[in-house]
Amino acid sequence: MARIFAVGDIHGCSNTFKRLLLDKIKIQKSDIIYCLGDYIDRGIDSKGVIDFILELRAEGYTIYTLRGNHEQMMLDAPISKEKWNHWIKNGGTETLMSFNITTLEELPSKYLEFLESTDLYIETIEYIFVHAGLNFNIENPFADKVSMLWSRDDYMDSAKINNKTIIHGHTPVSLVKMLNQPNKNNINID
């Protein structure tokens, strides 16, 4: 039987990510891993995080990758000076350094393809995996792509998602709060 794991907000910490999967969880090829985005920025080895994900896939592991707001900031950075500065201010400098580049034009295409191929959400029979959350203030919570990347709203209308459990990151919470979340169908793992 497949074990299911969700990992959120790695932020360039490749050694921690590797230790979690290889030493603590001891992943097996029958496992299913959902990475909830924010692979890049802040930590010193964003490139190493993405390389490890790509290596796991090449070795036959099932690893799904969602887009976080930091990947979106990186993808948007070339659009304008304002967007570039916003990304740099939020950890883009560390990401560029990990790739040993100074502009995104220098980024090898396989990394851009990785970023562009990330999903905004993944829905299974029991769960919805998303980086930040869903907007339940509208009729169709899947229509608001911005909320999937940026939401910090805990409000949830389970009927709109067939009573599935949402697994997300994005908003840091203490371990105590994580273990004692009042809504067991809205689980924040950041």
Image (cartoon, rainbow, N blue to C red):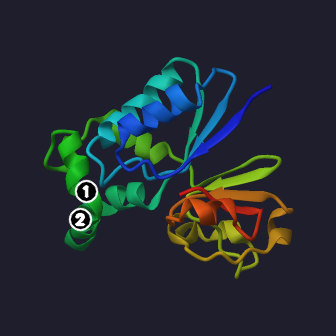
Q: Say whether residue 77 is visible.
A: yes
Percent coordinates x, y for residue 149 in the rendering: 51, 64
Residues marked 1 and 2 touching at CB (< 8 Å): yes
Question: Given the current orientation, which residue lies at the most extreme top position?
Answer: 59
Say which residue label 1 marks: 92
- Which image quarter: residue 89? bottom left
SS at mark 1? helix
Given residues 94 and 187, the one toward you in this image is 187
Rendered residue at 37%/31% (across/down): 51
- Which image quarter: residue 177? bottom right
Amino acid type of the residue that numbered disc 2 sits on in the rendered structure: Trp
Say which residue label 2 marks: 84
Residue 38 relative to residue 125: left or right: left
SS at mark 2? helix
In the rendered structure, which disc, 1 or 2, sits on the residue that comes first in sequence? 2
Rendered residue at 44%/24% (across/down): 55
Q: Say whether residue 104 is visible.
A: no
Amino acid type of the residue that numbered disc 1 sits on in the rendered structure: Gly
Given residues 43 and 25, the one toward you in this image is 25
Distance from disc 1 to disc 2, alpha carbons, whole Å, reads: 9 Å
Question: Given the current orientation, which residue lies at the most extreme bottom position?
Answer: 137
Percent coordinates x, y for residue 40 in the rendering: 36, 49
